[in-house]
Image (spheres, coloured by chain):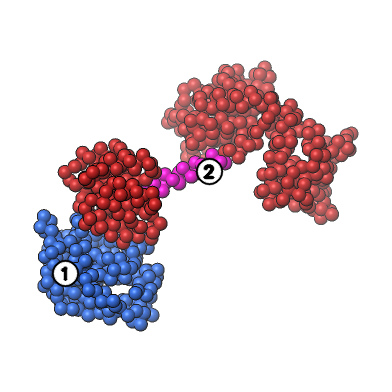
Chain colours: A red, B blue
Amino acid sequence: MNQEICIMVVDDETAMRESLAGWLTKEGYRTFTAGSGPEALSLQKDCPSVLWLVDIKMPGMDGLELLRQVKKDWPQVLVVMITAYGSIESAVEAMKQGASDYLLKPFDPEHMLFIIDKILKQQALVEENLLLKERLAEREGALFEDLVSSSPAMNPVFKLVEDVAPTDTPVLITGETGTGKELVARAIHAHSPRAFGPFVAINCGALTESLLESELFGHERGAFTGAIKARRGRLEMAGGGTLFLDEVGEIPLKMQIDLLRVLEERTFQRVGGGLSLTSDFRLICATHQELPQLIAAGRFRPDFYYRINVIAISIPALRDRLEDIPALATHFLIRYSREMNKPIKHFTPEALRLLSAYSWPGNVRELKNVVERAVVICRSTVLGAPELVFLQPGKEGESRGLTLQEVELEYLRRIITASDGNISLAAKTLGIDRSTLIRKIKRYGLNKPSASA
Amino acid sequence: MDPTTLKPADRAIYVEVIPLGRADEVAGAILSANLQEFFGLPAEVSPPWPVPDYAHLPARNQYDAGLILQQLSRDLPADGLRLGLTALDLTLPILTYVFGEALVGGRVAIVSVFRLGREPGHPRKDLGLLYERLLKVGLHETAHALGVPHCRRSGCLMRFSYGLEHLDALEPQFCSSCLQAIAAPHK
């Protein structure tokens, strides 16, 4: 049934108008009929139709004039022109002026319904696409909230993001772990002309040399043991979009040469393949390391460095923008309270003082994890110092003089206790895999019941 | 109960199958029998009405089904439903041809056998096939006359038929939603 879809039929000949409307009614559409352009325009104000079927030849305002008027007042309305065999030129003119299609009358019943069905489906796809783009933009927007800052230290970052986004220039983002390098890369991508292309990220430090090569360049079937089928690499996947190489300092020297060649010549080959492939991507790299030092140590090629470091963006550590801590913490508090369906309104002044006094070696990521953990254990409408006990100087001081293992054991015990023995939650708070946490629990002889007791 | 048919007690509408022009007695009998069988409606073949010259379109040598429906609507009894039956080539001004036509919910419909006996590559008419198609078009148009629009479900007779090939692929049966709509009381 198409009852919710309204179609307007505009024809000065009653028989044509009524027979067409009758047919469409049988097909389940809701129809409105008008004998002239002005009548149709007036009717549209009260009974808006998504599709208009308009006869070209009408006295007074003809179909083409009506088409122009409709498109001016209701640009989203789809218009199909109806014409006799003698006036194909008018139909072509109508298509140029924005008509979706035209029908030569009299037309085959199946042809008419096919055209209408096709146009409405196309329109539904266009609308769906717009909706998805809006949702994507909203999602990206939510991500960038994590970058919100009022600190002067972040101004150069935002300025550079704005400046480089519209270009294809390679960007090197530096900053300590957890400062939000990938978020900045995503912001550049989202504000670039490639925004609706893919954003392909790869952590170069997380893979062995051979795996990294295969991931980046892809491989052909049989290229190595286990390559049972051909696979596209990240370089190919990033075509039309942005390639983000995180931990670029970890890329082996030989692969730096290969990547340099890709950047210079824009061509590459899959592992085990002979065919030259091309991919149009924008490159953004990130590292927490000092690349000039790596160059001095012979671990990083200077030519590759100069190629990727055309524009450098340095993200300050959180301790260098302390004024951002309350706003960021509140932002995370709102997000996690909503996600966990908890009625936590705000921090107590003491809690905010604790957050601002902490050194944040793990930067924004650590702040985010700390707030998430505190929200989990908070049972009030206000998040206070008790939920942030592990940040208190006294508690931190207890670990002075202890070995690293002892500190880790103590910290694990606190987190597991704070998570009520929930291993998954504790692992999430610690930012490690569940299996890694279980291994540590076994190693230290911790177990769930005693931890939660 | 056969899920594709309705009980006779479901309604009190009386169907007249009205030949327009030269009568095909077999076709009329098939329609009336199946309307009773499928819809549970009392149905009878009436004496033929004259050829509808008023609906003739000389330029196309076809007959305007819309005008014929208007004629069938005149003096329609309160409990009546009229199904015209003709061998003339039917059309609507906006279309090249129609197998049948109905006023949705208007309790008038018409079917034509003119195009139903055509079989590409088979010069001789296949009467069995023609009557099977007539039955399907007759049931389809009568359901329209009872207020049922086209249906998107595959296999339902209320699905729009894109030509004879599609018509042949359909079985003479309705989906449960359309059956429900057909069974709804009509005043």
Q: Are marks 1 and 2 on the same chain?
A: no
Percent x, y of residue A5: 38, 54
User: Relative to the observer, which residue lies in front, B63 or B169?
Assistant: B63
Residue A22 image-quadrant placement: bottom left
* Residue linked to disc 2: A135
Q: Is residue A380 magenta?
A: no
Q: Please state the extent of the stretch shown in magenta in the rendering.
A: A119-139
Percent x, y of residue B65: 20, 63
User: Relative to the observer, which residue lies in front, B35 or A18?
Assistant: A18
User: Relative to the observer, which residue lies in front, A92 or A394?
Assistant: A92
Q: Residue at x 70, y 47 (%)?
A: A337
- Side of A242 relative to B89 (left or right): right
* Residue linked to disc 1: B86
Which class describes the residues within 10 Å of circle 1: few (<14), some (14-19), or many (20+)? many
> Where, quadrant-wise, is the C terminus of chain A in this rendering?
bottom right
Label the magenta part by its dominant secondary structure: helix
**SS under mark 2:** helix
The amino acid on which the numbered mark 2 sits, given as a three-letter code, is Arg
Chain ID at mark 2 = A
Percent x, y of residue A290: 68, 22
Chain ID at mark 1 = B
